[in-house]
Image: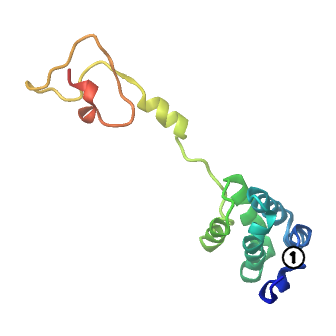
Amino acid sequence: MPAHHRFREDWTPERIRRQAARTGPNVEAFVEVVMRQRKHPEQGYRSCLGVIRLAKTFGHDRLDAASERALEINAHSYTSLHSILKNGLDRKPRTRATPSRQHAFACACQVIDEPAITHPNIRHTKGVPILMVGAPLARRADYFH
């Protein structure tokens, strides 16, 4: 092994998990997820050590709360976790956006019986409802017949 890699020879997944467990149970779970996402656990060592190092700056309790939030929202990177801590999102309760995406999509997929625009140059076939999905009606090709 090259000399500049020898300092890593005692790094093992178990050792990193133990270090994370000393910080908090959610940090341990976060580190476990990060290492499992990689083809080889060794590829996640630096990221995991960075996560553990965040406890020096933000404290064990905040890091544990931020790790819990990151796991909830499926944000499995050092950058996401650091952003949660930096913006204080670990201290704020997580609320769901209202209306939900599914609700918003259901509302957007309503059948339109009349054209949105009435103008003598716009022709619309009566009796054929147009399904509005996403884009405004004026931009949809099936609106103009």
Q: Position of residue 28 (x, y in %)?
A: 84, 64
Residue at x 75% of width, y 58% of height: 39
Q: Could you say whether the residue bearing mark 1 is in a helix, strand or loop?
A: loop
Q: Is residue 143 above or below residue 40?
A: above
Decide if residue 121 is on the left or right side of residue 27: left
Q: Position of residue 81 (x, y in %)?
A: 67, 67
**Camera-side residue of 86 and 82:** 82
In what quadrant of the picture does the N terminus appear?
bottom right
- Residue with the most extreme top position: 127
Q: Is residue 133 above or below residue 9?
A: above
Task: Place residue 18 in its image quadrant.
Answer: bottom right
Decide if residue 68 is on the left or right side of residue 105: right
Task: Place residue 54 in its image quadrant.
Answer: bottom right
Q: What type is the residue that disc 1 sits on?
A: Trp
Residue at x 72% of width, y 78% of height: 58
Label 1 neighbour load within 10 Å: few <14, some 14-19, many 20+: few
Decide if residue 38 is on the left or right side of residue 19: left
Residue at x 78% of width, y 58% of height: 33
- Residue with the most extreme bottom position: 3
Decide if residue 28 is on the left or right side of residue 121: right
Residue tagged 1: 11
Q: Position of residue 86 (x, y in %)?
A: 62, 74
**Camera-side residue of 85 and 134:** 134
Task: Place residue 44 in its image quadrant.
Answer: bottom right
- The number of numbered badges drawn on the structure is 1
Q: Position of residue 35 (x, y in %)?
A: 78, 62
- Residue with the most extreme front position: 1
Residue at x 23% of width, y 12% of height: 126
In what quadrant of the picture does the C terminus appear?
top left
Q: Is residue 70 above or below residue 56?
A: above
